[in-house]
Image (tube, helix red, strand yellow):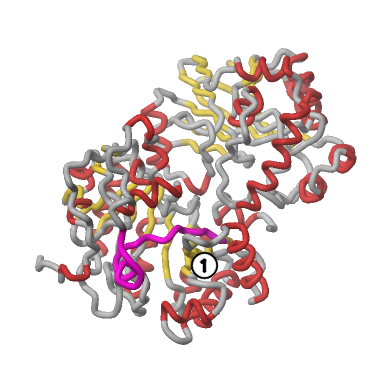
């Protein structure tokens, strides 16, 4: 495989002899599958995996390749699957992949909500309604109004995403909106603003998940990357509860291998192996993003 | 044959508890277990504690009991939505202030898990999951592979749990079972005002029956209002639909509800 353009990789300050906590994988609960690679129909200015049209650092994953990882995950006792990208719906076989996986466990699809067609919605309704496991659809919004959202995602994106959310609810899929909580945002106030906006837009049963800001990918270029003080270096091991960090219970597979979590798929040090079986070892929490996860107690998962 | 009756999540609903215990008495059971979370949500927490202890029912220490028993700051239900946490805190502050020190001491001493050997099967009773007291095991959010792993890891043929409030039973491909026995403190988000508990019969195989129990829910709602508990809580008791603490509810279970 050819090397990606290194210039867009997040920059990790070189360790200067510090000691970083070693994080065990307690159990593989969540298997993230970057099914669409870094391919996306949008090119958001804050994308933490720097996805966009023609971005092929991580390639689309073949259906058989996904099936292989799903089978390996099941053999390890995986609880649930997450499909991400890029934008999963740029993958021509996304619905087939979901149909393959959903009989084996809960699936969540993370989408920008701009590529729903009536056929796709009907198929999602059929898949979600017929399965004994939940099919969750998560849609990202970057502000409770078009002025903020479209700044990141391009003109008209907010309106298209709202249309997508309404269509999902109409099809019984009860989407989860994900939004970023900036460093200065009050969680309760932000949540209320989103929920009010979503209700006013016609959503009857809005669901919302807030995520902290990660200084990765284009976001690092847009604002700033991690600074030296944003680190878990030299933290006493007894002060870390491994279960507080999602990497105690997840792995992320892309066309380039298995990574410790869905955030660090562009970090060479976060590549744990070629197969899931090779990726069960401990991970050194040396990245600035590890600091964000630890401080906020966040998980990329639904709950 | 061994007959076991199990329930969880009493949430201070002393009227439902009394009705469930009557139903168990009428049908008969060799053993009766409450899988934890005696307080929260409902009124007058000591009433449920007195009924349960007076009847000599065995109980596990749920996250709520652990918090109340140890006078911790919150219920440790594990919500992240500030609205859910706000409602949870109202319940918790009310409950912790009205639970007697004797009941608190009793809660502190309860076991977190319990094992039973019956008819050649290893039963493991827990609150949330065998690995974490406040883990939500929703039916639609757990693959068979994961539940098999839990059984392997915790050396169990049958796992009994609660914590989510919606009962379910999965017979796994290996022949083992996971049973979420439900909660009797609030309805199962099914639009019915009654509550559910689980009856298990072990006799070579395992039969699991979820039993509906009606109780005077209007009397409970009036008590909650008299105690100035949130109107949203009384609404749930009267309608059978959850209004709060919905954050973790997966889409499949959510679709069956109203909010």
- Is residue A202 rendered to the left or right of residue A293? right
Q: Quadrant of residue A99?
A: bottom left
Tell me the residue at 42%/45% (across/down): B143
Does the magenta run of residues contain A209?
Answer: yes
Position of residue B142 relative to residue B177, above or below, is: below
Q: Nearer the viewer, residue B50 or A116?
A: B50
Does the magenta run of residues contain A212?
Answer: yes
Please name the residue that numbered disc 1 is placed on: A125
Tell me the residue at 53%/26% (across/down): B126
Q: Nearer the viewer, residue A108 or B135?
A: B135
The residue positioned farthest toward the front in the image shown: A229
Give the magenta part as a residue range. Answer: A208-226
Expressed as whole percent of the image width and height from the top left, the position of residue B107 reads 65, 19
Q: Quadrant of residue B6?
A: top right
Q: Chain of mark 1?
A: A
The residue positioned farthest toward the bottom in the image shown: A155
Tell me the residue at 34%/78% (across/down): A43
**Count of labels in the image:** 1
Q: Nearer the viewer, residue B234 or B188?
A: B234
- Is residue B186 rendered to the left or right of residue A211? right
- Is residue A155 rendered to the left or right of residue A253? right
Q: Nearer the viewer, residue A272 or A61?
A: A272
Expressed as whole percent of the image width and height from the top left, the position of residue A145 reads 56, 77
- Is residue A21 rendered to the left or right of residue B156? left
Position of residue A96 relative to residue B223, above or below, is: below
The residue positioned farthest toward the left in the image shown: A2
Position of residue A302 relative to residue A3, above or below, is: above
Expressed as whole percent of the image width and height from the top left, the position of residue A280 reads 24, 41
Expressed as whole percent of the image width and height from the top left, the position of residue B238 reads 82, 47
């Amino acid at each position: 495989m050819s090397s990606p353009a290194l210039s867009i990789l997040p920059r990790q300050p070189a360790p200067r002899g510090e000691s970083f906590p070693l994080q065990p994988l307690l159990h593989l609960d969540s298997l993230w599958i970057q099914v669409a690679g870094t391919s996306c129909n949008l090119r958001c200015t804050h994308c933490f995996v720097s996805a966009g049209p023609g971005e092929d650092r991580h390639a689309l994953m073949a259906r058989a390749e996904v099936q292989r990882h799903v089978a390996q995950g099941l053999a390890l006792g995986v609880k649930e699957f997450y499909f991400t990208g890029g934008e999963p719906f740029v993958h021509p076989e996304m619905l087939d992949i979901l149909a393959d996986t959903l009989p084996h466990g809960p699936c969540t699809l993370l989408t920008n909500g701009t590529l729903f067609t009536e056929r796709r919605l009907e198929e999602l309704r059929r898949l979600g309604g017929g399965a004994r496991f939940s099919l969750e659809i998560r849609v990202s919004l970057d502000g409770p109004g078009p002025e903020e959202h479209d700044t990141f995602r391009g003109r008209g994106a907010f309106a298209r995403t709202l249309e997508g959310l309404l269509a999902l609810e109409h099809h019984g899929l009860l989407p989860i909106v994900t939004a970023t909580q900036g460093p200065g945002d009050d969680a309760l106030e932000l949540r209320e603003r989103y929920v009010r906006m979503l209700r006013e837009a016609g959503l009857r049963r809005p669901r919302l998940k807030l995520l902290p800001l990660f200084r990765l990918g284009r976001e690092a270029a847009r604002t700033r990357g991690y600074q030296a003080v944003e680190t878990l270096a030299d933290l006493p091991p007894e002060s870390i509860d491994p279960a507080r960090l999602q990497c105690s219970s997840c792995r992320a597979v892309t066309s380039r291998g298995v990574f410790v979590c869905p955030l660090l798929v562009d970090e060479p040090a976060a590549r744990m192996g070629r197969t899931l079986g090779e990726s069960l070892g401990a991970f050194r929490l040396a990245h600035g993003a590890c600091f964000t996860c630890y401080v906020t107690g966040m998980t990329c998962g639904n709950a | 044959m061994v007959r076991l009756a199990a329930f969880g999540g009493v949430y201070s609903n002393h009227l439902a508890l009394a009705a469930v215990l009557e139903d168990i008495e009428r049908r008969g059971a060799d053993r009766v277990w409450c899988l934890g979370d005696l307080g929260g949500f409902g009124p007058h927490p000591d009433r449920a504690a007195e009924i349960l202890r007076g009847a000599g029912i065995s109980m596990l220490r749920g996250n709520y009991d652990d918090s109340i028993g140890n006078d911790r700051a919150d219920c440790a239900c594990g919500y992240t939505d500030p609205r859910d946490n706000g409602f949870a805190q109202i319940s918790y502050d009310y409950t912790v202030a009205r639970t007697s020190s004797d009941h608190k001491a009793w809660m502190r001493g309860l076991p977190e898990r319990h094992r039973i050997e019956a008819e050649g099967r290893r039963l493991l009773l827990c609150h949330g999951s065998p690995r974490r007291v406040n883990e939500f095991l929703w039916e639609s959010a757990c693959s068979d592979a994961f539940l098999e792993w839990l059984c392997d890891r915790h050396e169990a043929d049958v796992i009994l749990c609660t914590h989510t409030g919606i009962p379910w039973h999965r017979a796994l491909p290996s022949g083992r079972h996971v049973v979420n026995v439900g909660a009797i403190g609030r309805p199962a988000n099914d639009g019915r005002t009654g509550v559910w508990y689980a009856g298990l019969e072990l006799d070579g195989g395992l039969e699991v029956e979820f039993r509906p129990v009606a109780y005077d829910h209007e009397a409970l709602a009036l008590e909650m209002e008299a105690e100035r508990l949130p109107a949203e809580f009384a609404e749930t008791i009267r309608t059978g639909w959850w209004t709060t603490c919905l954050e973790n509810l997966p889409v499949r279970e959510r679709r069956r509800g109203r909010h």
